[in-house]
Amino acid sequence: MATTDHRKQSLYFPEDMLEEIQREATRQDRSLSWIVQQAWKVARGDIRKMPSVNDVLSPPPRPAAPARHLPR
């Protein structure tokens, strides 16, 4: 049987977002943690498609110089 990792982590949400998550947790009679975990499972594919900070801040690759043919 797999064990579940119950590490404690603090997450910070804007107040309006937290209130919305709390309302949904109450509606579904679930914990905040469960709601956020389910949201991550649903959204992770889309989030992985987003560019990373390194992708955005890195300069674009330089185009390769055209091949030069030397006369014989």
Image (cartoon, rainbow, N blue to C red):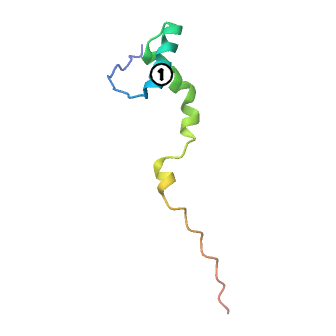
**Residue 1 image point, x, y percent:** 42, 13
Q: How many marks?
A: 1
Residue that carries the numbered disc 1 in the rendered image: 37
Q: Residue at x 52, y 20 (%)?
A: 38
**Residue 8 image point, x, y percent:** 32, 22
Q: Is residue 39 above or below residue 68?
A: above
Q: Residue at x 47, y 10 (%)?
A: 30
Q: Residue at x 53, y 46 (%)?
A: 51
Q: Work out whether residue 13 or residue 48 is closer to the camera in this orientation and state it.
A: 13
Q: Quadrant of residue 15?
A: top left
Which amino acid, mark 1? Gln
Q: Is residue 69 above or below residue 60?
A: below
Image quadrant for the C terminus? bottom right
- Label 1, secondary structure: give it: helix
Q: Is residue 58 above or below residue 41?
A: below
Q: Residue furthest left?
A: 8
Q: Residues within 10 Å of mark 1 (few under 14, many from 20)?
A: few
Q: Residue furthest top?
A: 29
Q: Quadrant of residue 43?
A: top right
In the image, taking residue 69 as reference, residue 15 lies left or right, namely left
Q: Work out whether residue 60 or residue 21 is closer to the camera in this orientation and state it.
A: 21
In the image, taking residue 9 as reference, residue 51 lies left or right, namely right
Q: Residue furthest front?
A: 16
Q: Residue at x 53, y 23 (%)?
A: 39
In the image, taking residue 68 as reference, residue 15 lies left or right, namely left
Q: Work out whether residue 60 or residue 28 is closer to the camera in this orientation and state it.
A: 28
